[in-house]
Image (cartoon, rainbow, N blue to C red):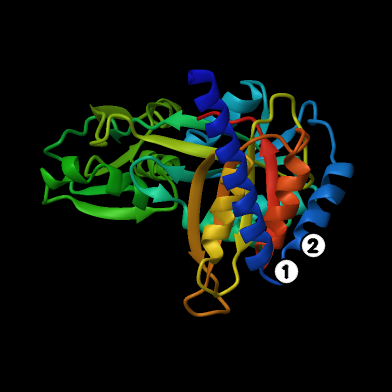
Amino acid sequence: MEAQDAQRLEQLDDQLRQLLRERVDLTAGPSGGSSGYDRCREAMAAGRRPVTRPRVVYQGVPGAYSEMAVLSFFGPETDCKGLERFEDAFEAVRLGKADYAVLPIENSSTGAIRQVYELLTEYAHYIVGEDTVQVEHCLMAPRGASLDTITQVYSHEQGLFQSDRFLAKHPEWKQIPFGDTAGSARYVAQTGDVSKAAIGSARAAELYGLEILCRKTNHNRNNTTRFVVISPVMELRPGADKIAAVLSTPHEVGALQRILTVCMLHGLNLVKLESRPMPEKSWEYLFFVEFTGSLTAPGMDQALQELARSTAYLRILGNFRGNI
């Protein structure tokens, strides 16, 4: 009886999947995302192998967590260069001045990095890898400084926010946002002023000759930043098991549910769903999704076609090996 019951359940499961698939087909929008499927296949055909001895850019200066992500992903001898803005890194890749850019996309404490998500929609680049860096902020200052001499603290706004509980114990300190954490450390070192301090990595303190007055200023001890590796063309690296995409849905009831149904029907584990407003349209959104799988796996072609039929816009951002 148990074998018969299991067989009946399997048949019911197959019937349910078929009904859901038929419902997706019936309710799908005007196939506005179908060109996204075609672009994906064209990008796969034009893909490249990973670049050996690559030129890599990141936002910030030496000692930044972004530099640490570069060295972690590509190796300690990597030729890398810090740039002032996130967009500068995207531009360097577009112009062929760099083979890759490594940029933060989300933090476990403070969430998504909005500017990077927006730039992913503006540039036709691809995500080919990801890495994570454990963030452990330190309070650092020129030699001779102490907690009593400090009146100003510099850091990236995220560094200040992630250290807000520590800073709340010193309300007399003026908090001054800076372009990046390592840049704030470099600036404080250049002033030599014992009334100024910075919040950043221990590596930044070492590079710029600052004394660490307090370690682990961030209240979340599991504070981790996730970085993505950006390439001008798609790469299908060995072990790629995560797919990233950006899409929009028809402005109608059940549109997002169709996307989730397609993922369920094809056994795609949705691991990320992030929405961003569409600048040109009020109260409409782009959705950044990540799900497990390989673009070359059996059945993925059909899954992408069904996903395309269910969206108003679809762009596959890349297939890479997950690090989290």
Residue at horizontal 48%, vertical 33%?
63
Q: Image height check: is 119 above or below 93? A: below
13 sits left or right of 163 in the view: right
Residue farthest front in this picture: 1
- Closer-to-camera residue (315/305): 305
Residue at horizontal 49%, vertical 51%?
273
Image mark for residue 32: 1
Q: Quadrant of residue 239?
A: top right
Query: Which type of secondary structure does the marked residue at label 1 adopt?
Result: loop
Label 2 neighbourhood size at 10 Å, few (<14), some (14-19), many (20+)? Answer: some
- Closer-to-camera residue (266/203): 266
- Closer-to-camera residue (29/114): 29
Q: Image height check: is 91 above or below 164? A: below
From this viewpoint, is residue 82 visible?
Answer: no
Q: Amino acid at mark 2?
A: Ser
How far across and down, in percent of the image, does residue 193 sit? Answer: 28, 43
**Proximity of marks 2 and 1: CB atoms separated by less than 8 Å:** yes
How far across and down, in percent of the image, does residue 110 sit? Answer: 35, 47
Residue at horizontal 28%, vertical 29%?
221
Residue farthest right in this picture: 45
How far across and down, in percent of the image, does residue 117 sit? Answer: 55, 55
Q: Image height check: is 301 above or below 212? A: below
Distance (Cα) linking label 2 and label 1 = 7 Å
312 sits left or right of 269 in the view: right
Q: Amino acid at mark 1?
A: Gly
* Residue at the spot of label 2: 35
287 sits left or right of 174 in the view: right
From this viewpoint, is residue 205 visible?
Answer: yes
Query: Which type of secondary structure does the marked residue at label 2 adopt?
Result: helix
Q: Quadrant of residue 220?
A: top left
How far across and down, in percent of the image, does residue 160 sit? Answer: 29, 47
Label 1 neighbourhood size at 10 Å, few (<14), some (14-19), many (20+)? Answer: some
